[in-house]
Amino acid sequence: MALTLSRKAQAVKPSSTLAITAKAKEMRTNGIDVVGFGAGEPDFNTPDNVCEAAIKAIHDGFTKYTPASGTNELKEAISRKFKEFNKLDYAPNQIVISNGGKHSLTNIFSAITNPGDEVIILAPFWLSYPEMVKMADGVPVIVYGTKENGYKVTAEQIKAACTDKTKAVIINSPSNPTGMIYTREELQAIADVVVEKDIYAVADEMYEYLIYGGEEHVSIASLGEEIYKRTITCSGLSKSYAMTGWRLGYTGSSVEIAKLMSSVQSHATSNPNSIAQKAAVEALNGPQESLAEMKVAFNARREYMYNRVKGFPYVEVQEPKGAFYLFIDLGSAIGLTHKDRQITCAADVADVLITEYATAVIPCADFGAPNNIRLSYAISMEEIAKGLDRIEAFLKELK
Ligand SMILES: *Cc1c(COP(=O)(O)O)cnc(C)c1O
């Protein structure tokens, strides 16, 4: 046996967003004034009351192992939040707390997937889903949402993609990268297909609090007993509470699935960080004002960005309803040239923008949308204004 490596690990694509981010960082080190629209995390600090709770946990000596799937105190807090915010009944023994939403999602696939099982992913999708499914020996099946339908996939499309190997469908609303949300009616239709085909729904509701303009967040599991039984609901503290570095995610599921995930986690990582768990209790149970303030700031940036970008040449945008991203279709710019360089895809656009305009954007080929870029508005209004000036200048140079 030679020194070969894991085929599975080698088949995993490293995150493509890193290349642009690394280039932006290097340029910044060299004193260049780079505008970074790549951010996948809130620019705000974690709220003070949450930080104080963590400091107290350290001083109180709450620094040891906790139960592998999390403390009962935090499960109680999450259970209450599920009930009040999501209209979902998950008792503490149905909740597993993990090291971030990503960890929760990988636990889900370890618990439900057997080799060859197909998992339906709705494109444009968050780039980690296909890799996560493959890491669990599953087979990603991509179904594309149309522009006409707000980049959303219909229940009929999901039904048509089901085979006898289909194990689950992943629903991410609000969506990263499109910022779109599925309505109650759309989710009801999808739930009907999930129940009819007797598959699982994996509901990634990481951006559930970040919804603007009076739209409501609907958890698919709340739409009836049958869909509730088949859904694993996943959320976390990262995006809503500006706690990306703390690594706290969680799931609500059947007791059976919770037990499997907890068992897998007990061998892989044991409990999520004890201090972060205390902080999360405060985040969920304490005052919620900072959450509301962040939302107001995100909303102002969203409106400014959308209203400016929709007037730019060669772009097509739809008003994002949630998360903190603007998803831009540059299909009309493909084939044009910028100072003799032909633009063949959104990755070319991103390359020219970073190299010549010191502006980092995320090209979305790895999100299932090769003609699109994603701009994050988790950066200050001043930076957004400056960056949009640069993108506009770039677009006006196209011939
Ligand atoms: C950020 C993100 C997550 C997970 O975030 P963690 O930092 O691991 O908590 C999950 N799903 C989507 C769509 C995300 O954008």
Image (tube, rainbow, N blue to C red):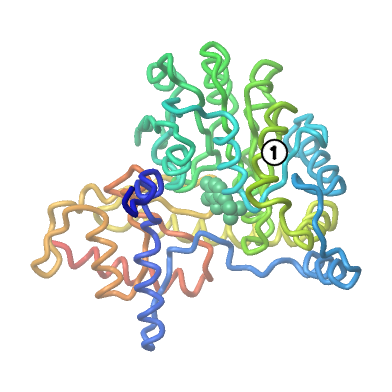
Relative placement, left or right, of 132 versus 278 is: left
Q: Nearer the viewer, residue 107 or 237?
A: 107
Q: Residue at x 21, y 49 (%)?
A: 332
Q: Residue at x 70, y 45 (%)?
A: 266
Residue 217 x/y as whole percent: 64, 37
Q: Nearer the viewer, residue 188 or 9?
A: 9
Relative placement, left or right, of 77 versus 9 is: right
Q: Is residue 305 above or below residue 83?
A: below
Q: Which quarter of the rendered picture does the C terminus lie within?
A: bottom left
Question: Which element type, helix, strand or loop, lies under badge 1?
Answer: helix
Relative placement, left or right, of 20 versus 257 is: left
Residue 228 x/y as whole percent: 68, 23
Q: Residue at x 50, y 43 (%)?
A: 175
Q: Residue at x 31, y 51 (%)?
A: 2
Is residue 371 shown to the viewer in this render?
yes
Q: Is mark 1 within 8 Å of ligand 1?
A: no
